[in-house]
Image: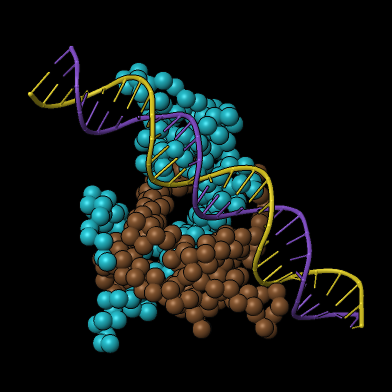
Chain colours: A brown, B cyan, C yellow, D purple
Amino acid sequence: MGAGDFESRWLRPDVNAVWTRFLQVTHRLEHQIDRRLQGNHGITHTQYEILVRLADGEEQAMRMSDLADVIVTAKSAVTYQVNKLSEMGLVERHKCDSDNRGTWVKLTPAGLERLEQAAPCILSLVRELFLDDLNCDQSAELDKLLGTWSDNLDEHDRNPVHRPDH
Amino acid sequence: MGAGDFESRWLRPDVNAVWTRFLQVTHRLEHQIDRRLQGNHGITHTQYEILVRLADGEEQAMRMSDLADVIVTAKSAVTYQVNKLSEMGLVERHKCDSDNRGTWVKLTPAGLERLEQAAPCILSLVRELFLDDLNCDQSAELDKLLGTWSDNLDEHDRNPVHRPDH
DNA sequence: ATAGGATTGTTCGAAATTGAACCAGCCTCG
DNA sequence: CGAGGCTGGTTCAATTTCGAACAATCCTAT
């Protein structure tokens, strides 16, 4: 087989190495965060992520769907986690006036407090692991990369399925 | 509060944006791959990943633990998935001569075939989404970044817990 | 108006992942 | 040797995630 054949069917070895390392790094990163968050603060990374997003939002509240979008997970998973957080007293549901189907999820004072306790822990981790070694150029470069990846993903979400390849 | 205080407790807004986008991109990437792989080829991303690793290994085989390491998941999850793949006939277990506790997992012909069917689908996706937009410099840069992240993670794995921060 | 279609959130069952407990077999050091 | 500790792999219960189905509500176009 020719080199072109190889390249079209598989990834070039160096490129392949980048890809697999990317997968490994992201997974390990998730695990570290999760372990630390659960060990020291009794919440999951997803739960933490929800708290962060709520704190960010107007009135420290957000709609379920929007939450699902930014967290990038199934709506049912959000329902599940919001129930948990609600049982823990970190979050409250409120009816939505402008749309009777909707519900707002709102951070409680306890929720905010918990977030503020947990944040330094994981932010310092993120800094040490992920960001501290970036100089300005690199960080700008990374930002650009993430931007194009994000755009590509949007693109693919818009045309969900091309022809299946077999 | 002073600016320094802010910076030590939270991330600078631009840095924060990079971090959250990183999380979103990686999650969306995983979902796209999974959806496509399950829809077109009836296997999960983790299962695909196992097949890839086996194909890579000597004799198209690998030990359970090593598999768990490269895939970055719990050993029990590997057991679970290898059972599934084995039921599908894509993989076989063999006793390990040099170590009676160990078991080799080996790709069957059917497994190789399945992998070769699935690979183009996901590799083209990876290319389109992730790699095509990288020029040489960027790809080198990314490789370097991944390298330092990986090293940082190694570091943290070695000293698992510093003092908890509260 | 109102019918048809889209969107919101929940529920349910199935699948996946985890961590802890566990048994074997290995290995080292007295 | 052989007792202790370590490693490889599986089992098990608990947690989480997903997708599909559903009811309620909204929106649009005729």
Q: Position of residue D6 (x, y in %)?
A: 24, 33
Is A106 in front, or is A155?
A106
Give the image location of residue C17, x and y in percent: 47, 46
Q: Residue at x 52, y 62 (%)?
A: A84
Q: Residue at position x 52%, y 41% from top?
A: B47
Above or below, comparing residue A21 to residue A117 in the picture = above
Q: Which quadrant, please, contains the C terminus of chain B? A: bottom left
- Quadrant of residue A118 in the image? bottom left
Question: Residue B118 placed where, x, y %?
Answer: 57, 42
- Decide if residue A137 is in sight here: yes
Is residue B140 visible in the rendered image? The answer is no
Q: Residue furthest bottom?
A: B1
**Residue shown at the point (30%, 73%) measured from the top left:** A137
Q: Left or right: A74 with respect to A139?
A: right
Q: Nearer the viewer, residue B142 or B155?
A: B155
Q: Position of residue A134 (x, y in %)?
A: 28, 68
For the residue pair A80 and C6, the one nearer the viewer reads as: A80
Is B163 displayed left or right of A160 in the figure?
A: left
Number of numbered tags placed on the structure image: 0
Vertically, is B61 above or below B28? above
Place residue B141 in its image quadrant. bottom left
Q: Nearer the viewer, residue B127 or B97?
A: B97
